[in-house]
Structures are given as C-alpha cells and as structure tokens.
Amino acid sequence: MATLGSRLLRQDRARFVGRAPELELFDRLFGDEPEANVALVHGPGGIGKSTLLREVARRGEEKGWTPHWVEGRELPPVPDALEDAIAGARDEERPLLVFDTYERMTALGGYLRRELLPGMPERTVAVIAGRTAPERGWFEGGWESLAVEVELRGLAEKDALALLRAHGLPEDERAKALVSWADGSPLALTLAASAPGVSPEADADLMRVLVRRLAEAEFGASQRGTLAVAAIARVTTPELLRAVLPEGDFDWLASRTVVEPLGAGVTLHDLVRRAMNADLRRRDPERERELRRRIADFLHARAVAGEHLLSIDLAHLVDSPVIKWGYGWEGSVNYRIDDVRTSDLEELDLSAGNRRYFEEAPERVAVARDPNDEIAGYVVSMAPGNAPEFTATDPLLGPWLEHARATAPAGDVVIWRASVDLTGKPDSGVQAMLGVAGILRSGVGNPRYAYSPTRADLPGAIEFAEALGARHVPELDYRAVQCRVIDYGPGGLLGAQRDVVYRELGLTPPASAAAPEAVKAGADDVRSALRNFKLPHKLAESPLATGTGQEERAESVRVLLREAADRTFAGGEDDAFLRRVLDLGYLDAASSHEIAASELALSRAAYFRRLKQASERLAETLRS
C-alpha cells in the first residue's frame, strides 16, 4: 500500500531540476574509481543544498550505497551524538554519510577528520553541506587528496523555468518575471510558485516567509537595527554603521552566514537583503525611511569629500525604476565594466564616429562584458578638459563641446557620445552600468552638467531624461540623436542623487551647496576637531565642515581628518607610530588618554608630546 511518505518522496523527486554538473560529479563518486570520498557542498541560504542532498541520497541508494542522514539543526555538538546518528555505518561496505546544515555542527569538524571518517570503510562517500565555505582543515593533512569542494550557485534560467513548471506554473511572462526576481534561488522560486497571481516584490506574506526561512537561524531581536541598516545599504562598512546607528554591531553582522564581504564592508545575500527590506518597509516604514535618510546623508558627505565611487551606493537607495534604468550598479551581478580590447573592433558594428574613439582614444571608452566575456554594451564619454583633439571636428560632439565650454567654464561637465546596451534586455541593468561608467571615465567626480545623446526610439531613454529634468537643445541634435542637457544643480550629481532620495521619502532636500573649496585650516581648528571627533554637534560647528545638516557636516570633517592622516603619515616607522598615537588619541580613541599611553608604552608626558606633534603635522597637511 502506498504511504504518505512515499508520495512525498515521489513529489520531491519529480520537482528536482537542474544541477547537471554537480550530479555528474556525484555519479563519478559512486563509480569504481572515485576522484574523492568527501564532497564539501556550500552555498547561501535558499540555494537548494538540502534538495540536492536528497537527490544525491536517492542516486546513491540506487547504486548500492546506504544513506545515513545527519541534520545539523538537530544534533548536539558532541562526538557521541554523531556516533549515534550514524550507528551501523561502520559495518556496511558502502555507507553514504550526508551531513546537512553543517554550519550548525562545525565544532565537530576536527572530530570528523581525526576520528570518524578515517575509521569508515574504504568505499564511504561523505557529503557535507553548509552555508559557509569549507574550513582549511579539509585541504591539509592528506585530506586535500580525498575532498572536493562543490559551490552551489543560483539555477540557470532554463532550470528555474523548469522548476516553476514542476510546481504547476506555465512558462509565461509571469514565470519569466519570477525567474528574474528570484535570481536563481530555488527557495524563492518555490515560495513564489505557491502564491499564484501575486507579485513577489509586493506581496508582504511571501516576503515574511522568505525572511523567516532564510534567516531565522541567524538573527535575533537584539540586532534588528543592525540588520535594518544592512537591508537598506548596498554595502555596510564599520564607518557607515557607526554613523547611522551608533549602537550597531558590525562584528556581529560580519559573522552571519548570509552576509558576504563586499568592498570595504559586507552585504547581505541579495535575496535576503531584498526580502528583509520589503519586510522592514511593511512592518516599520518610518524606521526604514529614517535609516535610509541617514545612510544617504552619510554617503553624500563621504562622496563630496572625495569618495566619488559612493555615487553607486547613493544610486542603490533610489526607488524610481525610471532613474534606475539609466544609472545604477545592479547589473554588476551578471556583467562587468572593462577596457577596450583590440578584438572588440572586429566584433562590434561601430559607426565611423564611435570607431575613432575606440582606435585613437580608448581611454574614453568603457565596455560591458557578460560572464562569457561577450560584449554586452559600450560607452564613450569625456569632459571638456580631456576630450581628444579630433573631437573638435566630430559632427556630433564638436558643437556639444563648444556649447559645454560656454555653459560651464569650470569644466564640471560630462559629455557622452554613445551609451549602447547590446543585450536587447531592458532589465539587464547594462544601460544603468554604462551610465555610471560614463561618469567615471569622464574623470569628473561630481559634474554639474551632463550632455546626453538621447534616442526617442530607445525605450526608457526619454523618460529617464525627463525624470532628471534634462533640457532638450534642438540646435545640437544630430540625425536621430537628441541632445539633452542635465543641470544637476549647485551640489552636482552627488547632491542631485541625495535630493532624489529625500523626495522619494517625502522630505524637503537640504539646500544645495556648491562643491567645497580647498580647506584653509588653522592648527586650533584641527585640534578642536580632533578633540570633538566623537561629538557630531560639535564637529558640525567646525570651520572645517562642509555640506548641510548636522550629520552631513560632522561626517565631512571626519572624512577630511582621516584622509589627511592617510597622506600625512605615509612614511616609515616613525610615521606609522605617530599615526597610531593619533588614532588612539582621537580618530579611534581609547577609553582614556591614560589607557592610550599605556597601550603605546609611553609615559603620560611623552604621550601628550607625541599627540601634539601628530596634530600639528596633520594641521600642516590641511593648510598646504
């Protein structure tokens, strides 16, 4: 008689799709001459590790192996509990040991390598699956010849569609939208398939399930604020968290298995971040709005102080799909920006005007490439100060360049000749990446104006230009290309980005200010700023501060002092010691000057003498 259990097994097998390379590997492990005995499977939450393990167990059993399943969530981290879980395996010729949720039992890793696995039969196959990459012990002491690493990534598009079909969804436009939204996550696809007729981005119940399933084992109530910041920001750095949420715990955040390193900080796994952000907006919209504002202020202050790449992080905070179409970095999951290669000229069908920049001024060109290194798009951009000489005779850019020089004598202008997405996919994110790449290639970190070639037949182009307030200058049109001039305002592109975030939050943007001039600081100003480094209200009053609003002005001083310290103490051991004195005294202060002196092994008098010396050198750098 068929049982409910057998029905569950049949359904589970029927719904398994994809993972062909991984299954080929496991089939070899079940062969007569296996390349390894231990498979170390890892990947983020929701990526399908447990589903793969169940299929491996079924295949192994069909080939004569006896599965023994160990679930880390149910196992106390002591050797006896593990021995009980695999009782009888030592007496079998071909045991298959399956360890799931290994991140919950990593304390047993040494015991597995030292005691348990060496005593198992020669034909044993052990499959160990967890969220984190395997520890170093699996690749030393001889285990490197017996272990193989298997990193699970998202399902390919065809496999994702097959999974939806297995759950009863037809391969229609909604299915394709779900595949794009889920980013290859089998869990997200399965949950979305269980809610026919709803939009996953907007369905709060679906988001709550995702949050619970992906993160319930990792997150407690004590760090909700820290998680909220990480759910909103593209990258969470120690400095950002400290400025936005002083009580936040960066070390705790960085230790979560659904967190990945990115740049100078960390980021939540994309699916987790999106799910948590949607849940936060539903559950506590006011808190989400306030944190997003604080993050925008912090990023803006750092960006205008010289960290221009933070424009990407500011773009991440914008909700408008119209603006995201033309400026953003979400497409970097699947594409990258590269320099021009000689072979690109053979692959691209370029107009004569664009080809000349590829051949004679490749530094003015950036190319987008996909994971297979195929060209996905390209951009040609420049500023009046670095435009090639032949641009003066360019029938498109020559008049634009002349107009730009008259409009902005300071040269704070970016001029695009072309920005071409070759993917044919409006949601690829390539067009937005080319927008960012065009700014970076121009060499103007915070332009006041932008001259954009806009085609009315390109979906999204006119809407993007109008959303930014671009002005059509008909006399500069060239054939089918319209000239649209964007005036970002006195605060430049960076100020405009912050203002967009404010308006989306329903707030009045701070008064725009022109880009700051070089700092003229006296020694007293620098010493006062150092003493008040941890006091935002005092720093905001400093003559060194720029920007508007207390938080932005305070952060501008912190950035200024840190960057000046980097330049000042870049020499040998003496400089390194003075930098440490300055850090312990002010920038990353110890709890008291006495403790700082003790850590530096200095007398109190010597410590204050060195601190004064470091402060004076810092002030000299800022005056120069």
Image: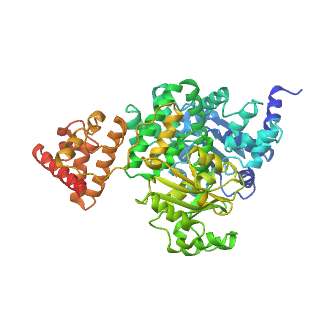
Residue 541, picture quadrant: top left
User: Quarter of the image holding residue 480?
Assistant: bottom right
Which image quarter: residue 105? top right
Q: Is residue 366 above or below residue 553?
A: below
- Where does the image place residue 599, in percent across and percent down from the top left? 22, 44
Q: Residue placed at 38% from the left, 37% from the top?
A: 243
Residue 21 left/right relative to 387: right
Regarding residue 152, the answer to whether it shows in the image is: no
Please determine whether, in this image, residue 232 is positioned above or below residue 312. Answer: above
Q: Is residue 372 above or below residue 12?
A: below
Identify which residue is drawn at 51% across, 49% down: 312
Could you tell me which residue is drawn at 54 percent across and 71 percent down? 391
Asked whether, in this view, residue 361 is left or right of residue 246, the answer is right
Residue farthest to the front? 475
Identify the image quadrant of the N terminus. top right
Task: Indicate the position of residue 493 as horizontal and vertical percent values.
Answer: 47, 49
- Answer with left or right where residue 524 lies relative to residue 38: left
In x, y percent, where is residue 488? Answer: 48, 48
